[in-house]
Amino acid sequence: MSQALRFALGQKDIPTHWYNMLADLPEPMPPPLHPGTKQPVTLQDMTAIFPENIVMQEMSPERNIEIPEEVRDIYALWRPTPLLRAVRLEKALNTPAHIYYKYEGVSPAGSHKPNSAVAQAYYNKQAGVKRLVTETGAGQWGSSLALACRLFGLECTVYMVRISFTQKPYRKSLMQTWGANVFPSPSEHTEFGKRVLAQDSESPGSLGIAISEAIEDCVKSKNTKYALGSVLNHVCLHQTVIGQESIKQMEQAGEEPDVIIGCVGGGSNFAGIASPWVQRKLAGKKNYKIVAVEPTSCASMTKGELRYDFGDTAMTTPLMMMYTLGHDFIPPKIHAGGLRYHGMSPLVSHLYKLGLIDAVNMPQTRVFEAAVTFARSEGLVPAPEPSHAIAAVIDEAVKAREAGQKKVILFNLCGHGLLDLSSYDAYLAGKLTD
């Protein structure tokens, strides 16, 4: 094929601003509510766990928010990330569809998560914070924050969901290599963790529990703030560098996507790829089909309810209007630990409610089948999380084949699976179930 398969931008093409989807919503989002008063939260309410500069971003109505030079300088270690056309996958599927993927696995931590981790560490450093505490599921966010804290000279503590702590030991090793303290959650390190273990000593944990532990640690400690890896507006904001770059790269490829797909758990990588394309959709550029793909076993959008709920199990966070399975829901022990969350980003939930995006769910064995198909054709081993997106991409490509219709598909491959090989072992040995 004479056409180039890799579409790369230069360092000068790293976005100078993050795109704030809130500025263009046709209907405003319901505000988060204080857990005690049930009134809309104020800036002062939020500064108990976040620095003021991040809270101002969370609440900002500005369309474009400038990326600090110090953050762009670190982004340049891996950004812009490549866009590739999956020609070999197209051939394996015998489809007329053109499949493109934005590959975020080239970051030092192997995923999209440093896009927000670096920004959050920078703003906390500016605010005089000495230590950040957080939760992590599969370990992608925890390792990214550990890296960012190391780069800005901050201490870092991570509560890692216990089942992932067991299934993915090298994520813990990566965090510790970058200097973080890592505890399996639920842990004996917090009062809430002790209560959970007293009720179930074999608890696999959940992101909701880990968030509760991290927040408890934060509010009881000096010079410490909390950092969140997904869900909230400022996290989704920082990830929009993905979608902005992909728009330029699709122009470079000379094609316009018909379908844009991303996996979704808390919502950060999906919002990152989707938001700039939703902006174009609202502006009448094209009626893109934009699809969020979640695990069948933890399907908040396709099986949950849209209502106010807590972001954590201990009910310490603000109440957010989101699709939820309930804050006390403990997800099954699936290997896509980054998607094991009971709720959905309020922003992504709002886009779904307004009909601007679609949602589907995928069972675990179907996801790994798609992951192996991708690895055997394209060479890259994808993480279990974006393999949900790959399963939906294959479905779209097969539909195009059956209809004899050319279709252009873009998806976000938000991380590699080289530290998830134990899950591939289980799949290849026939031990993985739905």
Image (cartoon, helix red, strand yellow):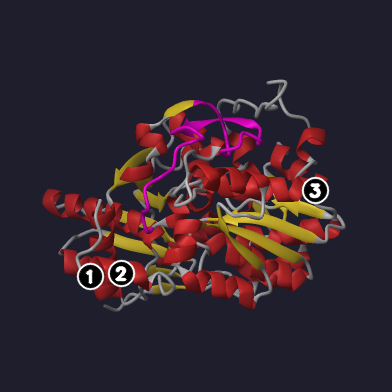
- For label 2, the residue is 424
**Residue furthest to the right:** 128
Using the image as rendered, state which of residue 37 and residue 301 is in the foreground: 37
Q: Residue drawn 41% across and 45% down? A: 331
- Of marks 1 and 3, which one's residue comes earlier in the chain? 3
How far from the left and from the top, in percent, is residue 269? Answer: 50, 53
Label 3 Cα crowd, 10 Å radius (few <14 / some 14-19 / many 20+): many
Check if mark 3's residue and mark 2's residue have beta carbons within 8 Å: no
- For label 3, the residue is 51
Label 1 Cα crowd, 10 Å radius (few <14 / some 14-19 / many 20+): few
How far from the left and from the top, in percent, is residue 344? Answer: 49, 39
- Per the rendered image, the range of residues in magenta is 307-335
Could you tell me the amino acid type at mark 2? Tyr
Q: Secondary structure at mark 1?
A: helix
> Which of pointers 1 and 3 indicates the residue nearer the eye?
1
- For label 1, the residue is 428
How far from the left and from the top, in percent, is residue 359? Answer: 36, 39
